[in-house]
Amino acid sequence: MHVAVYLPLLSGALLGLVAQRLARLLPPATAAWLLTCAGVLVATATSFALAMLAVTLVGEAAPIAALGPWSTTALEAASPVPDATSVLAGLALLVIAVLAGRVAIRRAKAAAAARRLCAALGGGPGDLVVVDDPAVDAFAVPALRGRVVASRALLASLPADERRAVLAHESAHLRHRHHRHRLAVELAAAMNPLLRPLVDAVDYATERWADEDAAAALGSRAVVARALARAGLRAAAADRRTVWGVASMSATADPSRLILRVEALLAPAARRRPGLVCAVAMLVILTVGATVEAQRDSEDLFEDSTVTVAVHQPGPALNP
Amino acid sequence: MAAVTGADRPLTPAEVLTELGGDLAYTTVMTTLARLQEKGVLTRERVGRAFAYAPADSAAVTARRMRDVLNTGDDREVVLARFLDELHPDEVPLLARLLHEAEGR
């Protein structure tokens, strides 16, 4: 229980460190699934471990021990967890609950806004809605079974095959329900802040996934690369202010995502790297396994403390 | 809003007040209509000393609402994914080079 209980923190930190690299190295669909699942499992293990750390102290509190069959003194003596740690763990759990709750509320509001937007846009499930807007952009709204929105300015600036690439990209987002990946990993990051880099990594992976999906649908990766680059240049010329997050990026920063996506489409397709996937999977399995094992230890701890009570109780009865 | 949409001609605040029939203050109705006009939901034209309000055409409202969604900052959640990502101005030449490369394929 000593080490195992802290393992989710360690693997969370490790995952956070390698998330971006995994998103760039692996085929995008693999990366998106791997990072989402790893994030959710490690985050769950984190909350679980915190709960175990906290519960030993709760068990030591007299009113609660009175409900259970274990002895507070025996539990306190046997518990390998210092009280301060338990208190911290309990507080951390509270903070996590609040953060996750806030993410959930924000997402629910966003979903409602998306539904309102869809209703305003009209059209049926999966329809393309063209809006008269000077901004050069397109997006998918994942509500009411999805709408793809594109501005007339964007469509007008692209040749027919590239227009199809844009629409295939957006429908891929809807078809593969990429918003669920993003929601899941955002909740995971709320539960374990060390997993925060996974949010951006999954974002990037789902973009790349949609790019590759569009490329497969059109039978050409170069067309999607052209569509991205041309639309990007057109948008840069049309309006720098609304489209580009310029202020947040310094000149020394990594190449921006649009550049990475175009470069990835022009490079050979990513290799599958089963070894790398296995290594990440092993890390997650180890973490979850250790947490389950620690939970068993924690149960034993309470049980052992219960046995002690049984031994001590007959004492006064024998010697009245 | 329903009162204005239901009418077959632009209504002045006084007419909207009669239409609503409640005990609202004239200034309340006037302010509300002015706000809706600022938001782009209503259009207005001058009739004598007052403005008459009519619903803006729905395409304009939609475009307006889309812009709102795009500009509020939390669009990442409402909107699944915008086709384009951020781009640093310095990278425009690089992107142009990449486009050229892609066109060569």
Image: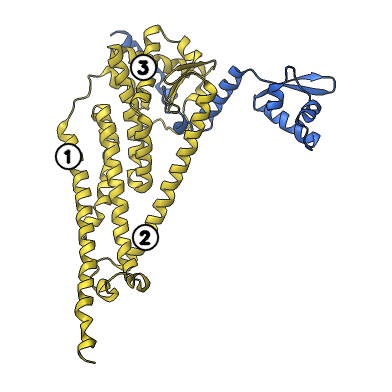
**Snapshot quadrant of residue A311:** bottom left
SS of the residue at dot 1? helix
Q: Nearer the viewer, mark 3 or mark 1?
A: 3
Q: Nearer the viewer, mark 1 or mark 2?
A: 2
Q: CA distance from mark 3 to mark 1?
A: 33 Å
| Residue at image point 50% right, 13% down | A152
Tell me if label 3 and label 2 are in contact, CB under 8 Å: no
Q: Amino acid at mark 2?
A: Gly
Q: Amino acid at mark 3?
A: Ala
Q: Residues within 10 Å of mark 1 (few under 14, many from 20)?
A: few
Q: Amino acid at mark 1?
A: Ala
Give the residue pinned by disc 2. A90
Q: Residues within 10 Å of mark 2 (few under 14, many from 20)?
A: many
**Tag 2, which chain?**
A
Location of residue A269 with respect to A296 vertically, above or below: above
Of the residues under marks 3 and 1, which one precedes in the sequence?
Answer: 3
Q: Position of residue A219 (x, y in %)?
A: 27, 12
Q: Are marks 1 and 2 on the same chain?
A: yes
| Residue at image point 58% right, 17% down | B59
Give the residue pinned by disc 3. A168
**Tag 1, which chain?**
A
On the picture, is A233 further left or further right than A172?
A: right
The chain displayed yellow equals A
The chain displayed blue equals B
| Residue at image point 80% right, 34% down | B26
Give the residue pinned by disc 1. A279
